[in-house]
Amino acid sequence: MAKLWGGRFTKSTNKLVDEYTSSISYDKELAQEDIEGSLAHVKMLGECGIVSPEESETIRQGLQTILEKVKRGEAAFSIDQEDIHMNIEKMLIDEIGAVGGKLHTGRSRNDQVATDMHLYMRNKTKKLIALLEHVQSALLEQAKQNVDTILPGYTHLQRAQPISFAHHLLAYFWMFERDKSRLSDSLKRINVLPLGAGALAGTTFPINRRRVAELLDFDDIYPNSLDAVSDRDFVVEALADCSLIMVHLSRLSEEMVLWSSQEFRFIELDDAFCTGSSIMPQKKNPDVSELLRGKTGRVFGHLIGLLTVLKGLPLAYNKDMQEDKEGIFDTVRTISGALQLLAPILETMTVRKDRMRHAVEKDYSNATDIADYLAKKGLPFREAHAITGKMVLYAIEQGKYLLELSMEDYKQFSPLFAEDIFEALKPENVMRARESEGGTAPHQVEKQLKLAEEKLAQA
């Protein structure tokens, strides 16, 4: 089959070249965006008198017919036409005749593919924001039910201080809020139109680029035609944003894996989101959470891959840039699937409040409050810290926890201790004492919940 660009060539393309360079196997995902851009382009061509009104309408109707076939899954894509652009153009010519060949007037595949990618990223970015909001809602609902639930807080995966479980969950809410903010901010750079830049230098036809931007709801156009066709910063930015989202998903998934283990038993994941073992009947494995954690690597890989492709490219367009698509397509699928699963996992998990409470009663995570107690009585904090460290060592040697020591034990270390130390060291009072803004005290967590609800309501 003759190539639509084949006029200058005397030989057919080697079949191996066709197979190696063709992108239709994956860029067919851009079919709707490609047609959307073409509909705006041909409308502009008609308005500018570059094609007649009748030709513009005939092409428009042909594109609409192809669009319906694409939506129904009836469009047949061919490797002989290399990519989505040539496939759509060939379908159009087959549908309406030679006039379909006028669609490509005043543009190049270089600015066309860039436009397709901008349209794709705009659509997918908005969908990712919506999916993040669903996860935030799930976190918020669990947090509301667990303001007074006491959880051992950790640093270095060592017991640190008792905290509200709601406070812990809301930490992830704010991570995802930053993710949404980054995605929203990226729309400013995504929503810039490259179409009309031509292959690299613009076009001799009297096109109206700003009219196309208006029709496609873009905020602006690229001011430089070379930059317009060679820019993939917005794809790199999306991959970087998605990499950070996956970092946050992975950290939360890791905690769910730990918390659901027999060693912790802080939560129980719903059976619908776990699997069993082929050999060990007792097993209930958090496989979904593990895969959410594991798929982070492939998203990181796509980011590094595209950065590596772009770092040595001269202006303007190069065939290497074809490699921008599979990575971002896979990333969007990966992260969309992860977010769609995470929300119901959070919604259905059972919180073992008794286990969490038992854990904070059997550790030394209230030790900081001894140091604070002494400091409030006038002792320099560094001295209070040293005394508390010695008390912890003494308690360990005695096989006791701090609340199990007697007043006589306490008086050995400082005459400043009084009976109120035992109230101060109760886990619920340790948690309630953290009243600084943003702290884990239930009153502060309630404020945080209200702020989180307001953020979601603004979305």
Image: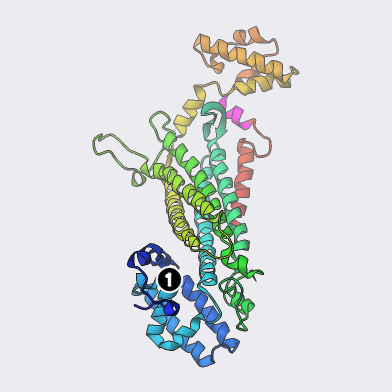
Q: Nearer the viewer, residue 111 or 128?
A: 111
Q: Is residue 141 visible?
A: no
Q: Nearer the viewer, residue 72 or 79?
A: 79
Is the residue 308 above or below the residue 213 in the image? Answer: above
Question: Callout 1 environment at 10 Å: few (<14), some (14 to 19), or many (20+)?
Answer: many
What's the residue at 27%, 38% (across, down)? 277
Q: Nearer the viewer, residue 37 or 291?
A: 37
Snapshot quadrant of residue 282: top left
Colour option used: rainbow
Is the residue 244 above or below the residue 118 in the image? Answer: above
Residue at the front extreme?
10
Query: Which amino acid type corresponds to the residue marked 1 in the rendered image?
Result: Ile
Q: Horizontal and vertical percent for residue 375?
A: 72, 20
Q: Quadrant of the N terminus?
A: bottom left
Q: Give the residue at mark 1.
A: 84
Is the residue 9 above or below the residue 309 in the image? Answer: below
Residue at the left extreme?
279
Left or right of 296 on screen, residue 449? right
Residue 238 is covered by the magenta coloring: no
Q: Horizontal and vertical percent for residue 345?
A: 42, 47
What's the residue at 64%, 77% (across, down)? 210
Is the residue 125 above or below the residue 38 in the image? Answer: above
Q: How many marks?
A: 1
Stretch in magenta: 426-432
Q: Horizontal and vertical percent for residue 121?
A: 52, 63
Secondary element at image label 1? helix
What's the residue at 54%, 44% (across, down)? 172
